[in-house]
Structures are given as C-alpha cells and as structure tokens.
Image: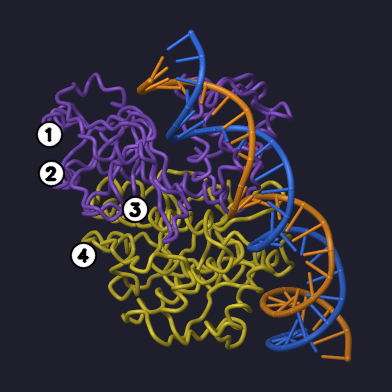
Chain colours: A purple, B yellow, C orange, D blue
Amino acid sequence: MRTRTLTQIKQDIAPIDVIGGARCDECPIRYRAVCAHCNADELSYLESIKFYRSFEPGQAIVWAGDRMDFVASVVTGVANLTQTLEDGRTQMVGLLLPSDFLGRPGRERAAYTAVATSRVVLCCFRRKPFDDMMREMPQLSHRLLEMTLDELDAAREWMLLLGRKTAREKIASFITIIARREAALLKRLPGGRMQIELPLTREAMADYLGLTLETVSRQISALKRDGLIQLQGKRGVLLPDFARLVDESGDDADGGWIS
Amino acid sequence: MRTRTLTQIKQDIAPIDVIGGARCDECPIRYRAVCAHCNADELSYLESIKFYRSFEPGQAIVWAGDRMDFVASVVTGVANLTQTLEDGRTQMVGLLLPSDFLGRPGRERAAYTAVATSRVVLCCFRRKPFDDMMREMPQLSHRLLEMTLDELDAAREWMLLLGRKTAREKIASFITIIARREAALLKRLPGGRMQIELPLTREAMADYLGLTLETVSRQISALKRDGLIQLQGKRGVLLPDFARLVDESGDDADGGWIS
DNA sequence: CGCGCTATTGACAGGTCTCAATCCTGGTGG
DNA sequence: CCACCAGGATTGAGACCTGTCAATAGCGCG
C-alpha cells in the first residue's frame, strides 16, 4: 500500500497552465494523433477550438470518478493511467506517449486516474464539441477506432505479461518494449547495442508490471549481474545485445507478424 | 505447459457447418451487436452477404497468425481468445459472448487464437466487403468504436485482476463477473441468493485468471468451505449471498459509477 | 468394466512479497 | 563549503502464497 508523497500533493494543487495557439501543421504529432487523417478544413476547425494544458511530473491530470469535460492528445511527455483497489494496491493500465489519446468520447467521468509521469503537454478539446465532431468527421472517428484497436492489442499483450510471465521476464519485456519504442522514434530497427532511458521510476515500473518495487530492483540487479544490461545513473540503461534481452523476455522469437 | 487433447485435435479437423439465411430482424443480438444501429436498408444489405458458421466445444475458430478472411459476431455460445508463450504458458485475453465481435477490420491475420468454449454460432462477413461497409456505413463504425472502447475498459479491469489480486480474490471476482452477466441477461440486478452456471472448465478459468488449474480448484474449495458458494455438479454454483462474495473480490464496494 | 477426461487433494519447492536497514544522489540551508 | 535531508534505489532475511509433481476420485461413454 502506497501513500502519496508530499511533493505529489503540492503538485496536485498547483495551478494548471493554459497555453494558446500553436499551429497544427507544425505539430509534432500531426500524422499520428487522432487528427492524423483530417483534411485542411477539418484541421483548421480543430485548430480554432483546441487549447493546450501542461502538467508537471507527478501531477494528477484527472482522478478516477471525477468529471472530465475534455478529451486530449498527448503532445509531449509521458502520462499513465492507473486503477486502485480499496486497500491501495495499484495497477497501471495505460502508458500514454505522444500522440496517444486521453478520455473517452461520450463519457462524462474519468474511468481511471491519469497522472503525468514526466512534464506533459496536452492538446485538449472540450468534450461536447468533440462529440459533435465525431459525428461529422468520419476521419476522426475512423482514426480513433484504429487507435483504440491498437490499444486493445497492447492491453492484451500486457495481460499476457501480467498473467503468465516471471518477474525476470517482466523486466526484460519492459526494457525491450521501451527499446523498441525509442528505436521507432529514431526510425531505426531495434537490435545490437542500444542505449535507452527508462521513462518510469522503480515504483511506477512495479505498478506497470504487477510487482513490488523491491522485486523490480532485484531483477534489474540480476540482469545487470548477468551482463544483459548496464546501468547509467538511475534511469539510463545500456543494452550490449538487444537480442539476448529479448530471449529473456519469454516472448516468441518472431513476434513481429502483426501487420 | 499444456498439450492439446485428442478430442480437440479431432474437432479441429472436423468440417465446418455453413448455415444460410436466418432473418436479421429476428436475430437475438439485433440490438447489441455491431449492426445494432443500422437502419432497415443497411440491415437488408448485411443480410444479403452474411453467412453463418458453427463450431463445437473445443474446436478452434482460428489460430493466431493464420489468415482470417472474415469477421463475425457471436450469435450464440461462448468463445475465447488466447495468447501463448513459447513454452506453452497460455493466457486468455478475451471472452466472447453473444453480440461480441471477432476479428479486426483491415487486418489480414488473426492476432489471437480463438476457440469455441461451448457450441458457438457466428454471423460472418467476408473481410473485404465488410471493410468497404465500414467506410460507407457510419453507424457500423461508430458501433464498433463503442464496442471496442467497452472491450478496452474490460481489458483494463482484467489487468487489475491479473496484476494485483490474490488467487482467492481472482476466483471471487470471476464468479461475480459471471453472476452479474447472468443477472443482466435476465434483466435483473445481481444480489441476494443467486444460482449460476460457470461457462468455463477449471483449466480455462485458470487461463482466464493467470493461475494454475490446481490453485483454481483449491480456491473454489476454500470458498465452499467458508460458505460463500455451494457447488451443484462441476459447473453449477449457488451463491447464498452475492454481497459477501463481492466483499471477497477486493473490488471497491461501489464499482458501478461508470456511466 | 475400463478408458478418457475433468476435478480434487496432498506434499513440497520455489518465487515473490513483506518488513527493515542501508546506500546514493541532488537539493537546501547554515 | 559542507552537513543535512528527502526521496529513490538497493539489498537482506524470513514468511507466505502459488506452482509443481503426483495420486486419487468422479463421471460419462464405448
């Protein structure tokens, strides 16, 4: 059972930035976010009603059960969705990266607690106008369907990890997931020697993986002892051989057949 | 590690029924399936190109990685989606009930192995024409989005169960999930004394819950000893007091705030 | 009756959690 | 400048839960 730190509480009550007016055609997530397939007209309408909000690391974006009168795309930074049991056990159920979508059209209250993992900038739309647009812009709803189906696939992969993998496999899986993602950002294939930055604390990794933070720490140390990773500070990780780490993840060797 | 039984293998190679021509307006899932919001014209078009297939208990509908040139709604029966690690550990990642949708538009190969849990009847559409319809019938894609978002919510609830609940809580959760569903079918609220039928074998429950079948069996026996359930044959369960079982599931008392 | 399959139960081993101490690092204030 | 502190991370010892291996029971069916 975890209690919230003083730092987190201070950040929760900090004022929320509202930033105006960046241009959509210069947006870093223009071709991956929910607006990806919109045409110029549609985009200029979106541009006229969008607004930005930013959140500091540890700051809550919304609490489960609270009213949420906007939906948003993550522009920069990392946020996470968590669920909690009565006694405080918490499980991360979503890791939101740039271009990912937050909130559910048509739903008034948040189903999950969303917290900024790093500094996060959101591109927000009030829920009502967005719901209307969903009806009028098929590009928008088609793209959201596509993204939701991808998220469902990711959730199912995650379920396999939670239900059936050992602690060691969970850690190896998590590191390879991050490595693949960083490679994708650099438009390269993952492989060979790689250097990555873990986006989560040990505690957040534990919540992601369904472990305790002690077990996370121990397994990371074990992978280090076995020469599969080297640590560079608390967050930096050097992978001398990506393939060897994948072997430890328990996944099928050729997991890449999904279109 | 599980091996497939002889019975399963025999059923895999058994011929597949193809049934023709039931009328959509008499369909038991008319108002809950992907076609729920379609108008009469749209429905008559769907009716003209749909076809039925049925599967026996244990029979594979599709194997992960295989070509799948149709999508389908479950009309009657129960099917499940599973993923498998190299060494045979398997995790169920979807439980498909009447009106649930199988397959992903635009995807050529199945991402998961789908197996009939009971006798299953599917209402199928070839993938190509269905993809076209998705573009032309907004009702269809909106409904699919709605269903996919619901499935994502279910998957996230499932992740909490897999990552953070004890074996006892997992079993109690599973029984309450089934009980809620059976109550919903009878259009009643779950509560008080209830009688249900488990749709899965102990092994399938284990794959659903991320446990071994021995642990499932032991925890069911423990709940029985504690008077929370009574068994009636292998599949029948009597719940003397639904609320007491919910207490054992670890969930928040009022989990019902989601719209 | 014997066979195949599902389910139950036991004994034991091992993996992960719990509780606790210690270390490390960056930031703060004297 | 240096001591101190807070929070994150590491490490250890022991307990407990769940998995593994194995034997047995119950049931339907040929």
The alpha-carbon separation of the residues under discs 1 and 3 comes to: 25 Å
The alpha-carbon separation of the residues under discs 4 and 2 comes to: 29 Å
The quarter of the picture where residue A36 lies is: top left
The alpha-carbon separation of the residues under discs 3 and 4 comes to: 26 Å
Q: Secondary structure at mark 3?
A: helix
x, y percent for residue A178: 52, 31
Identify the residue at horizontal 53%, vertical 37% (top origin). Answer: A202
Residue at numbered disc 1 = A49
Q: Chain of mark 1?
A: A
Q: Secondary structure at mark 1?
A: helix
| Label 2 Cα crowd, 10 Å radius (few <14 / some 14-19 / many 20+) | few
Circle 3 or circle 4, nearest the eye: 3
Q: Secondary structure at mark 4?
A: helix
The quarter of the picture where residue B45 lies is: bottom left
* Residue contact between numbered discs 1 and 2, judged by CB atoms under 8 Å: yes
x, y percent for residue C7: 67, 78
Q: Chain of mark 3?
A: B
Residue at numbered disc 2 = A129
x, y percent for residue B59: 61, 66
Label ID, residue B149: 3
> Taking B51 as reference, is A187 above or below it?
above
